[in-house]
Image: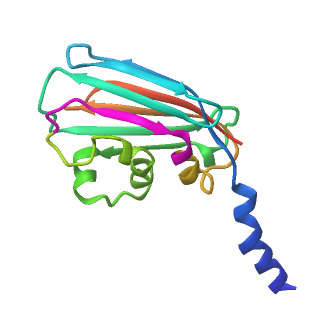
Amino acid sequence: MSGLWTFLLIFMSPMAIRGHFEFNNVVCLVRDRMFMDFEYCYLKSVNRTYKYLSLKTKMFRLPVDNCETRFQLRMRENRRVLYNFDFKVDSCKFMRDRKHVIANWVYQTFGPYSNLNHTCPYDHDIVLDKLPVQHLNKLVQSIIPDGRYMMNSTWMVAGIPRTDVILYFTKS
C-alpha cells in the first residue's frame, strides 16, 4: 500500500500544480523623479499566445552602487501566510554571489531579458526587453499554486525607495 502512495505522490503531484501563467497588468511607480523616470512600462499582446512585458528606466544620477530590492508576492483573494512572500535583498551583494535562493529564482524569471546581468556599479539605464509570458510559465508552473497574484518590487538606492514595479498575474 505504501508503494502506491509513493507512486501517486511522486508522479501525480507535479501534474496537479501545472498550469497557465498570464499577465493581467503592470504598474510602474516612480517615487523620486529627480533620481529616475520610466521611459516606458507596458504589457503587449501580439496575439493570443504571445504576450510580453517591457520597461525602460531613465536614470538621472549615476552610478548606482548601493541598491536594495524588496520583493512581495501576495495571493490577491487569500490571506494565507503560506502564499505571502516578503523579502529584502542587497542587490549588489546578490549579483556578486547569488546565494539567496528565492532571490535567485526571481532573478531567473527576468534575468535573460534584462541588462541587470552584472554587479554594481550600474552606470546605464535599466531595460527589461520583451519578457514573454511563456518564459515565466516554464518557471512558475511547478512552484506557485493556482490563483491571482500581485508581485511588488521596491527598488531602493542609498536606503531611499526610488521606484516600485507592481505586476498583477494569474496562474490557472
**Which residue is at 81% across, 86% downward?**
3
Quadrant of the image containing the C terminus: top right
In the rendered image, the vertical position of residue 117 relative to residue 26, given as above or below = below
In the rendered image, the vertical position of residue 17 relative to residue 90, given as above or below = below
Residue closer to the observer: 46 or 61: 46
**Which residue is at 47% across, 31% downward?**
53
**Which residue is at 24% across, 22% downward?**
58
Question: Is 4 on the left-hand or right-hand side of 13?
Answer: right
Residue furthest to the top in view is: 33
132 magenta-colored: yes
Residue furthest to the right in view is: 1
In the rendered image, the vertical position of residue 45 relative to residue 85, given as above or below = above
In percent of width and height, residue 91 lies at 27, 45
In percent of width and height, residue 132 lies at 50, 39
Question: Is 136 on the left-hand or right-hand side of 121?
Answer: right
**Snapshot quadrant of residue 159:** top left
Residue furthest to the front in view is: 47
Residue closer to the observer: 44 or 90: 44
Q: How is the image coloured?
A: rainbow
In percent of width and height, residue 66 lies at 18, 38
**Which residue is at 14% across, 41% downward?**
121
**Snapshot quadrant of residue 63:** top left
Which residues, given as a range, are shown in magenta? Answer: 122-135
In percent of width and height, residue 6 lies at 76, 80
Question: Is 66 on the left-hand or right-hand side of 106?
Answer: left
